[in-house]
Each structure stands twice: as structure tokens, then as C-alpha cells.
Image: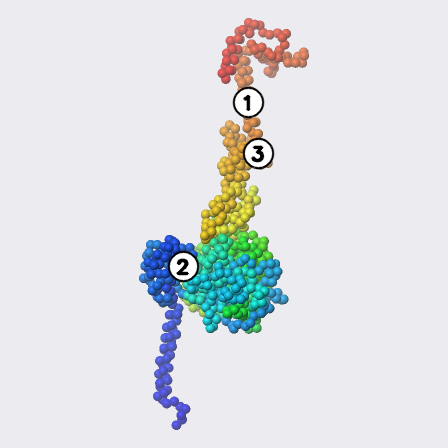
């Protein structure tokens, strides 16, 4: 009997075991998948209580919570004493009781969010400074950092914070630059960001990123940071449960002290996730750009993502896709697109990182006081960009968050970066979905930053592009011509960010490709197909963003194209398409004014309205001008806006209307008029406008036609009262003489004047035309000689009574 053959009973048992195990495995695989995809609820709540810290403590104690601290504004972090730390079901009863409290305006039980460190793991090796090829090398395929250092910029005075899994603050290459005011442990709620050590060194990520930015120079240890004299801090927020509140608290840490926040994490890069910041994180971003850095705006640098192998799109990541973040992609040492890189239209620029096996990686600090030359992924690219931005801020501390994005766009260079999608946009710049506007150039950005003038206030024009729902089918195109909100305060003339906010349903979302074409012909790919995305949820008001039309004019026809690239019989409906144009507006000033507008705003309020101008500018109707227009003069107006706990200045220089009745003026005083309105004249002695009565008003066109010289006109106005007085006296005397002569003529009196004959002097009679002679009867002549014959005494007596009556009449007049 052959011993190698199994008995029939054993074979039956194996088949039976197989029949039992296969269904069990199927149940485990397909049964656990929904559980793994379910929401995980924590025992923490984000609560909005307007009454202050003491009020929040009372409400927390009343409902069984512990107040774990203040997030920002009126938001607080509550942790319940009895609710389990992680659960697949929400605590509806606890939540409802908290919301019913009249002093609570909003509350939300926090969910665990999946966040992946954008890192490619490799074993560390000993570092060398010469291995930092990306900072400077002889072939100039680098970030040109050495040239920026030679200009004297090393990041001094600038503070950068790494939002990650902690920072080894006592690392010998970091301790000298470590800043405790830029650090916090959000996971454990204490000021110490020291990472948690494990056998696998899982929490090395933040320390590695910190070394890229600010590793100390000239200490004979490891390498140097891009901004090796900058201050560096870290926020431990990824080594635990990541919730909306954790993200918001990290993004809003000490915004008046921290200049740059660097983040190399985000939603899962699996090619099927669509996720972004929730309510509190969104508000943290908005508050950061409005209130951070004294109103100039916090700068958020973000790694674009490592989902290239899964064909992911960073436009499905709401952090890199935000207008408030400066999204950074990667290039390999040889200028190729790395295998992990994601392509999207929201990427602004690129720095170096790892690539293939034969390409060098990034040198930086590592856990346990070590150093590594194996930092990888877009995780390594974002901190390099943060360091370069620190150099630019040292060159010009007045740069706003939008100024920095303009500088990146204008100074980044395509260089030797290789890809097949380089395109020239409407203003002549090369741009790519893989690299944005190209490789950051440290020397170029600090040089331009030194002389940079801040851009004008941000304008936001929102346009509805769809009047009714449209069936997508295999292809859908929407065309509409826009005027970019012409005639309103939202008018945009030069673009920055452009968003296409879409709501659509589709039975397989991953088959869709979405493109946006600007009036200048720039074609942005808002979404490329994602083979792993089988979702039928579509997009719900998702803001696809592009930077590819930067500085283009927005007026004209915009085109949205949606197509199913798989060619299958998929179906869906587009229900909303809203075009949002962000940018600046060039406001034309009065033709007689030398004002320059649109580039001097210092502070914007929550509605993106300018409320304070830079030095040398004056606030005029929500814009900044260098000279007030006619009818206005320089004055001060209150600044009714508070940035954090700091209120300064109490008032701001502004163009204020001249005091009535001045038409133009040199100051706000009523005695500082330079010109006056119609029916008034300028008194140069008092500097006031004198109102003229109806009889003294100058009739239109009675003096000059057309424009006159202002000085001669002012001199004419000053002599006008004297001229009118003289003319009035002459008119009164002429009237008196005329009435007198008329009465004399009617009474038959003869007026005699001295003769002009004989001696050539005056005669005794005065001729009024023809041979008629008029003599003054009864009034002795003062011109006649004594020998001149006069009328008889009888005739003189006859008219005596009449003469007396006439004199009385004239006296009465």
C-alpha cells in the first residue's frame, strides 16, 4: 500500500474544511469593509459658547464634560467623562442635551479623520552637508539658496511651525533655533511637542521636516536648513486622534507670532477619497489669512500629495485645493516627475525631493539626535518651500499672504523640469499640472521681495453659470460669457485663483474628467480620471481650484467641459456650476487727480474690505490712494476692528470730505477752502466761502467762456465785491442826476454852463444836442464869471417856489 496517498476520509475532511473556511473568509473580508469605512466617534465635542471661559466651565460641569481648553474665538474643547473614547455610534442623547442648553449656540461631536504622512519610508544613513545637492550644486539644478545667503538672507527674525507628529526640540541641530512659542502638543494638551518614541520610529516625520527649514549652520553636525537662522517650532497633532477641532487648534496656534505653517499631510492618497477641512478648520484658515501676522495673513504651505501611484488628484484634497494654502509639488534630482507625485491645477510651484533608486534624496535631522539623507515624498518638498518663504519674509516683512503667492508665481522657473504638459497661459507664463509654475528660486524671490509693493485688496466675483440641471451623459460642455462683476465692488480685472464650484451626481465618479477653459484659452484640468474611485456620490458643492490663469483678464467666455473618458454607458446630472473669480481690480481715479489705487492696502476685514492702508497711502472708499481726490482732504477715521487682543492703531489716515461750504480744501477746517461752490466767492483773508445774494451773482457766461486759469479766477473773485460797490455808487449818482434833470426840464428851467468861447474856458451854458440850451435857473453858477448876463430877477423869483419844492423832493429821495 502506498503510504503517500491520503485516505478517503482525510480528503473528505479537507474538502469539508475548505467549504467552511472559504465562506468564513468571504464574510470577514466583505463584512469588515463596511465597518472599517464607518465613522468613528470620539468622546470630545467642539462647542461654541459666547459667554467666555467661565461660562464654558460651568456648562461643561453641568453636562458631565471637562473643558479641555479654548480653541479660538468662542469655541471650546469639551471631553465627556463617561462616553467611551472611540465608538461607531454617536452619543445622540448627550449631544441633544448639550445643544438644548440656551447658552450653547453650536456643538459637534468630533469624528476621527484619517490623515497620512506624505512620506516614503527608507532606512536612514549618516548625513553629509555635501549631499545637500538641492540647495546648491555646480550644474545649477538647485533651489539657488546659496545665492540668497550671499545676499544676506538666512531667515533671521522669521518663525516657522511644523504641524505634524512632534519635533525633537533637544536635537543638537535644532535646539539653538527651537521656539517654544511656536510649539504645542495638541494631542496631549500640553506645551511640549516632543514626539513619542517607538521601535519603528513612526513619529520622525515632524523632526525631519523641521531640519529642512532651520537646521543650524556651522555647528559641524548634519546639514543646514534653507533658512538656518529662522526660528522653528512644532505642533504635535498627528500622533493621536485627528479631528476637526485638532486641526483648527493647530492651524490657529499663536498666529501673531508664527509667520509660516508647514503641513505635509492630508486625507488618504488612495485615488478614491474626496475630503477636506471641516467647519472649524475652514474658519481657522480664514481667520489666519485675515488676522494672522497683524493682519498681513498667516502663510500656510502644503504638500500636494503622494497619491501618484494610485492616480490620485490633489484637487480632491480640500487642503491643497484651498486658495489659502500654497501648494507645493516635487521634482526628482534629474528633473523628472516622481512616481508618487499628484498632478492638479491647484499646485503653485515645486521643490526637490526623492525619485528613483539612483537619484539622491533629502538630507535632514532625524529622531534620537541623528541625521538622515533619506527624507522623501512631497513631505520633503513643502518644508523646503517654507524655508524659502522665510527668506522672502526676512527681505520684506510687510508681505501679505497673497503677496507671497504672487512672488512665487513670478519667480518660479520651469528650468530643466521634464513633463509633457507644459503650456503657456494667457499672459505668457509656462505652467504645468505636475509642477505649477516651476521650481522655486530662493535668490530670485528675495530679490523681488525687497522692492515688492503689496497687491490691492482681494476681489471676489461669484457668477452662476447654470440656469437648469444638465444631463452629463458621455460629454457635457457649458459656455457662458461673463463681465467679471463689472460695475460693482466685486469687479475683478486681474485674476489670481479661479474656482468652479460643482454639484453633480454620477454613477461612477472616477470615470469623469473635468476641464475649465478661460477667455484667454488657458485649459485647466480640474479633475483627471481616477480608476480606483468607484463612488456614485458625485460632488456636492466641491470647489475645484486652478491657478493657471494667474494675472489673466477674466472677462469673456468661460467653458466647462465634463466627459466620461471610460466610454461606458454611465449617467449623471450636473445641478450646480458656480464660477468664483478671485483677483484684483484696477480702479480708475478722477482725471484731475494723481491718485494711484489698488496696491497699498495693509489690512482687510472679514468681508475682504480694505480698512487700513500702508504708510504713504490714504483710505478712500475702501481703496488706498496716494493723493485725495478733489473735494476730499487728509484726515483720520477710527479703525473699528480688533485683531486678536491687539488694537492698533486707534485711527487710520483717510480721505475725508471737505467741511461745508468748501468745494475743495487744504484741511478739514472750514477756514481752509481753496475753491467755493456756485453762488459763493472765496475770501482769501479768512479762507472761507462767502455767499452772494441774487443781485450780485455772476450770470453764466457773463465774464469768460471756457476754462480759465485757477489763480486768475481766484484773483477775480477777490476783486469782485469792490467792483460791484463802485458800480452801484455810479448807478445811484446817475439815477439821481437823471431824475433831477428830468424835473428841471419839465419845469422849464434853463441850466447855464460856462462858455467855452473867448478864453477857451467853460462858458455859462451846456448844449444837449442841436442848438438847445439848458440853463440852471435859480441856482448860482459856480463856473460863470461875474460879468456874464443872467435872467431877470423877476424870472428868478417866479421859479423860486418850484425850486424849493424840487430841493425838498430830492432831499426826501
Q: Foreground mark, 2 or 3? A: 2
Locate residue 140, reporting x and y percent.
61, 65
Q: Residue at x 33, y 54 (%)?
A: 102
Q: Which is nearer the N-term, disc 1 or disc 2?
A: 2
Picture coordinates of residue 776 (x, y %)? Answer: 57, 12
Q: Quadrant of the N terminus?
A: bottom left
Image point (39%, 54%), residue name: 52
Side (left or right) of 218 relative to 119? right
Find residue 69 and name its label. 2
Q: Which label was assigned to residue 151?
A: none
- Quote the CA–CA distance across marks 2 and 3: 68 Å
Label 3: few (<14), some or many (≥20) within 10 Å? some
Compute the Cα span from label 1 to label 2: 87 Å
Viewer-proximal residue, 748 or 652? 652
Say the numbered circle drawn on residue 714: 3
Q: Secondary structure at mark 3?
A: helix
Q: Which residue is mark 1?
A: 729
Residue 516 seen by the camera: no
425 up-or-down from 127: above or below = above
Where in the figure is residue 67, as x and y percent of width and height? 38, 59
> Going from the N terminus, do you reach mark 2 or mark 3 first?
2
Mark before the other along the chain sequence, 3 or 1: 3
Look at the picture and state if 644 lies above or below 35.
Answer: above
Tell which of 485 and 22 is nearer to you.
22
Question: What residue occupies the far bottom of the structure in this picture?
Answer: 1
Disc 2, SS: strand
Q: How many marks?
A: 3
Q: Residue at x 45, y 62 (%)?
A: 191
Mark 1 lies on a secondary structure that is helix
Amino acid at each position: 500500500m502506498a503510504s503517500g496517498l491520503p485516505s478517503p476520509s482525510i480528503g473528505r475532511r479537507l474538502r469539508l474544511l475548505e467549504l467552511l473556511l472559504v465562506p468564513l473568509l468571504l464574510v470577514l473580508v466583505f463584512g469588515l469593509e463596511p465597518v472599517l469605512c464607518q465613522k468613528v466617534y470620539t468622546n470630545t465635542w467642539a462647542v461654541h459658547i459666547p459667554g467666555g471661559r467661565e461660562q464654558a466651565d460651568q456648562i461643561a460641569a453641568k453636562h458631565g464634560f471637562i473643558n479641555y481648553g479654548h480653541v479660538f474665538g468662542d469655541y471650546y474643547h469639551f471631553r465627556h467623562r463617561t462616553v467611551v473614547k472611540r465608538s461607531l455610534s454617536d452619543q445622540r442623547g448627550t449631544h441633544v442635551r448639550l445643544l438644548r442648553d440656551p447658552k450653547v449656540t453650536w456643538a459637534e461631536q468630533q469624528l476621527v479623520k484619517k490623515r497620512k504622512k506624505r512620506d516614503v519610508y527608507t532606512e536612514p544613513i549618516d548625513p553629509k552637508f555635501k549631499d545637500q545637492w538641492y540647495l546648491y550644486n555646480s550644474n545649477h539644478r538647485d533651489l539657488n539658496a546659496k545665492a540668497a545667503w550671499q545676499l544676506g538672507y538666512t531667515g533671521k527674525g522669521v518663525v516657522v511651525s511644523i504641524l505634524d507628529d512632534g519635533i525633537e526640540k533637544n536635537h543638537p541641530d535644532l535646539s539653538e533655533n527651537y521656539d517654544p512659542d511656536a510649539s504645542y502638543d495638541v494631542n496631549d494638551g500640553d506645551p511640549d511637542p516632543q514626539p513619542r518614541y517607538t521601535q519603528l520610529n513612526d513619529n520622525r516625520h515632524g523632526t525631519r521636516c523641521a531640519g529642512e527649514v532651520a537646521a543650524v549652520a556651522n555647528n559641524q553636525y548634519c546639514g543646514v536648513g534653507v533658512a538656518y537662522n529662522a526660528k522653528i517650532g512644532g505642533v504635535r497633532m498627528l500622533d493621536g486622534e485627528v479631528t476637526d477641532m485638532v486641526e483648527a487648534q493647530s492651524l490657529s496656534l499663536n498666529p501673531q507670532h508664527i509667520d509660516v505653517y508647514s503641513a505635509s499631510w492630508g486625507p488618504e492618497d488612495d485615488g478614491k477619497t474626496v475630503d477636506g477641512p471641516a467647519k472649524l478648520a475652514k474658519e481657522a484658515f480664514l481667520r489666519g489669512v485675515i488676522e494672522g501676522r497683524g493682519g498681513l495673513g498667516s502663510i500656510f504651505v502644503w504638500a500636494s500629495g503622494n497619491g501618484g501611484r494610485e492616480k490620485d488628484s490633489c484637487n480632491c484634497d480640500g487642503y491643497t485645493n484651498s486658495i489659502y494654502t500654497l501648494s507645493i509639488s516635487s521634482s526628482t534630482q534629474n528633473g523628472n516627475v516622481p512616481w508618487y507625485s499628484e498632478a492638479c491645477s491647484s499646485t503653485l510651484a515645486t521643490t526637490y525631493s526623492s525619485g528613483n533608486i539612483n537619484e539622491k534624496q533629502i538630507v535632514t535631522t532625524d529622531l534620537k539626535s541623528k541625521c538622515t539623507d533619506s527624507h522623501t515624498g512631497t513631505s520633503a518638498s513643502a518644508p523646503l518651500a517654507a524655508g524659502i518663504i522665510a527668506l522672502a519674509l526676512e527681505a520684506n516683512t510687510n508681505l501679505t499672504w497673497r503677496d507671497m503667492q504672487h512672488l512665487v508665481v513670478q519667480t518660479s522657473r520651469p528650468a530643466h523640469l521634464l513633463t509633457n504638459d507644459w503650456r503657456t497661459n494667457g499672459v505668457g507664463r509656462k505652467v504645468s499640472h505636475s509642477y505649477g509654475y516651476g521650481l522655486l528660486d530662493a535668490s530670485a524671490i528675495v530679490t523681488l521681495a525687497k522692492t515688492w509693493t503689496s497687491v490691492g485688496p482681494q476681489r471676489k466675483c461669484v457668477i452662476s453659470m447654470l440656469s437648469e440641471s444638465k444631463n452629463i451623459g458621455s460629454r457635457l460642455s457649458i459656455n457662458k460669457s461673463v463681465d467679471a462683476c463689472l460695475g460693482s465692488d466685486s469687479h475683478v480685472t486681474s485674476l489670481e485663483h479661479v474656482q468652479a464650484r460643482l454639484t453633480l451626481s454620477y454613477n461612477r465618479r472616477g470615470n469623469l474628467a473635468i476641464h475649465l477653459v478661460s477667455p484667454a484659452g488657458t485649459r485647466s484640468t480640474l479633475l483627471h480620471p481616477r480608476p480606483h474611485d468607484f463612488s456614485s456620490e458625485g460632488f456636492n458643492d466641491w470647489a475645484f481650484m486652478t491657478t493657471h490663469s494667474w494675472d489673466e483678464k477674466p472677462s469673456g467666455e468661460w467653458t466647462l467641459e465634463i466627459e466620461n473618458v471610460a466610454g461606458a454607458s454611465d449617467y449623471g446630472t450636473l445641478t450646480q456650476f458656480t464660477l468664483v473669480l478671485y483677483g484684483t481690480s484696477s480702479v480708475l481715479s478722477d482725471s484731475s487727480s494723481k491718485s494711484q489705487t489698488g496696491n497699498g492696502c495693509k489690512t482687510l476685514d472679514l468681508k475682504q474690505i480694505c480698512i487700513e492702508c500702508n504708510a504713504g497711502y490714504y483710505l478712500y472708499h475702501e481703496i488706498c490712494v496716494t493723493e485725495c481726490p478733489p473735494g476730499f482732504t487728509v484726515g483720520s477715521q477710527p479703525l473699528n476692528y480688533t485683531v486678536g487682543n491687539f488694537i492698533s492703531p486707534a485711527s487710520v489716515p483717510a480721505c475725508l470730505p471737505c467741511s461745508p461750504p468748501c468745494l475743495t480744501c487744504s484741511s478739514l477746517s472750514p477756514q481752509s477752502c481753496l475753491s467755493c461752490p456756485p453762488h459763493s466767492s472765496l475770501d482769501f483773508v479768512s479762507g472761507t466761502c462767502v455767499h452772494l445774494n441774487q443781485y450780485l451773482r455772476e450770470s453764466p457766461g457773463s465774464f469768460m467762456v471756457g476754462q480759465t486759469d485757477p489763480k486768475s479766477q481766484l484773483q477775480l473773485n477777490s476783486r469782485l465785491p469792490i467792483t460791484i460797490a463802485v458800480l452801484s455808487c455810479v448807478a445811484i449818482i446817475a439815477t439821481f442826476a437823471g431824475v433831477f434833470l428830468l424835473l428841471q426840464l419839465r419845469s422849464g428851467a434853463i441850466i447855464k454852463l460856462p462858455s467855452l468861447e473867448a478864453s477857451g474856458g467853460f462858458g455859462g451854458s451846456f448844449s444837449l444836442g442841436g442848438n438847445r440850451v439848458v440853463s440852471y435857473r435859480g441856482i448860482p453858477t459856480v463856473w460863470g464869471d461875474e460879468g456874464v448876463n443872467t435872467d431877470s430877477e423877476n424870472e428868478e423869483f417866479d421859479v423860486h417856489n418850484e425850486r424849493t419844492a424840487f430841493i425838498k423832493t430830492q432831499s426826501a429821495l
